[in-house]
Amino acid sequence: MLKLKLSSLLFACLAALSVAVSAAEPVKSKAQSVAAEHVAKAAKVNINNADVETLQDGLVGIGKVKAEAIVQYRDANGPFASVDELLEVKGIGASTLDKNRDRLSVN
């Protein structure tokens, strides 16, 4: 009889703990996404004044050659009016632009 009561009590405690842990997970995930959003906003790369190294470090799929092409295009044509104008740079395609769209600014 005592084993049955202890088993029932243990089961109830474990069930309550499981519910508490499950309820806490979305709060943690939301906090993590808010923090990631703040980091992403702070880490935007301004393509109108970024140097080659900044472009390489701050963008996905942009190595030295493509970063140099961006700077050369900007030097030859003036500042970018929008991030979509990157498509005019040789070696930058729609896929690369889409991967980096949230990381780019022209301000």
Image: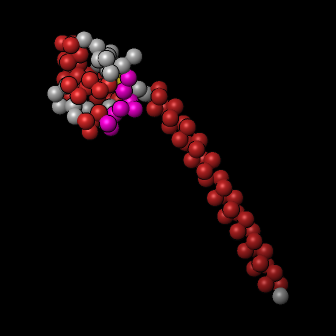
Task: Point out residue 102 in the picture as x, y percentages from the top left corner.
Answer: 40, 32
Q: How many marks?
A: 0
Is the image coloured rainbow, by chain, by secondary structure, or in one colour? secondary structure
Residue in front for this viewpoint, 53 or 27: 27
- Determine the residue positioned at 53% across, 41% down: 33
Q: Image quarter for residue 60?
A: top left
Residue in front for this viewpoint, 94 or 91: 94
Q: Magenta stretch: give its range.
A: 98-105
Q: Is residue 78 visible?
A: yes
- Determine the residue positioned at 20% across, 18% down: 73
Prevalent SS, magenta region: helix
- Determine the residue positioned at 47% across, 28% down: 41
101 vs 19, left or right, is left
- Determine the residue positioned at 63% across, 47% down: 27
31 vs 7, left or right, is left
The answer to whether residue 3 is magenta is no
Q: Image quarter for residue 107?
A: top left
The answer to whether residue 103 is magenta is yes
Give the quadrant of the N terminus. Answer: bottom right
Task: Point out residue 79 in the picture as x, y percentages from the top left corner.
Answer: 28, 13
16 vs 86, left or right, is right
Q: Is residue 63 visible?
A: no
105 vs 87, left or right, is right
Task: Point out residue 87 in the picture as x, y percentages from the top left corner.
Answer: 23, 28
- Residue at the bottom extreme? 1
